[in-house]
Amino acid sequence: MTRATPTDAPAADARTARIRDADRSREAILDAAEGLFASRGYDGVALAEVAAAAGLSRGTPSYFFGAKAGLYAAMLERAFGRREQAVRQACAPVVEWAQRDGDRAALRRALTRMTSDYLGFLIAHPAFVSLVMREGLDGGQRLRETPHESQAMGAMFAAVDRSARRRRLGSFRVGDAVLLLLGLTFAAVANRDTYMARLDLDLGQAVDMRRHVALVVDQLMALILGNAKAQT
């Protein structure tokens, strides 16, 4: 076994420090880029502005990510990775219900928790919501070209559908369930200041949040149970 000489230890410590500094700089750049791209869009941001917002030298973003397109892709990939992790955690109670063949009351509770947690994530991450909305306005090409995972919702509803068919509760299209959930959650948060405000609904208020979660769950229960009565 080769032992480190006294002069090796400082060199190793210096390498470790450089790696840590590089990791911190990279994350600072991605944080700054997410905020700027969310507020201004892709065309409204320059790399120099990202560097300034991150508190780094002008050329640092290019050093780590190359051109602006590389930085934007890395930022999107990280944002969707965090979203996917949060969605998997939110969906876990529903997947567990499907695996255990729980009753309808348990399904309603699991869907309620999932919906509340997902709405909570969206409300806590307005930059992510803005990024997705801006991608939609720009045609979504950059998002389609960026590797990102977004499968947790589909996997959850597929597990529920298998359980429902096995128990002869009817069947449903997984895509319909995903569309319904996104339409009543993401769209509601994205339009908090427009049509939600017009309807006098504020998801930042506990009473409105509870009512909206119940609405989402009622619709999901009706879809999932098909012709069976969507009741506990």
Image: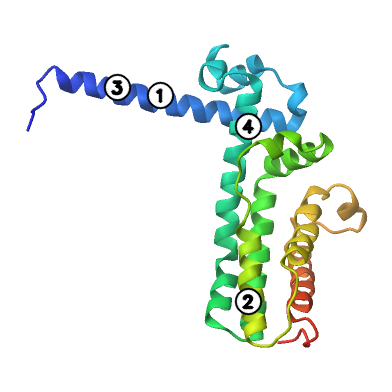
Q: Name the residue under label 2.
A: 162
Q: Name the residue under label 1.
A: 21
Q: In which quarter of the image is the N terminus?
A: top left
Q: How far apart are marks 1 and 4 (CA)?
A: 22 Å
Question: Amino acid type of disc 4?
Answer: Ala
Secondary structure under badge 2?
helix
Q: Residue at x 64, y 17 (%)?
A: 47
- Looking at the image, is 98 positioned above or below residue 27? below
Chain-order first, disc 2 or disc 4: 4
- Looking at the image, is 185 positioned above or below residue 100? above
Residue 211 versus residue 86: which sits nearer the camera?
Answer: 86
Q: Distance between the residues labelled 2 and 4?
A: 35 Å
Percent x, y for residue 53? 61, 21
Q: Mark 2 or mark 4: which is in front? A: 2
Q: Which mark is residue 9?
A: none
Secondary structure under badge 1?
helix
Residue 163 visible to the viewer = yes
Q: Name the residue under label 4.
A: 73
Chain-order first, disc 3 or disc 1: 3
Question: Amino acid type of disc 2?
Answer: Arg
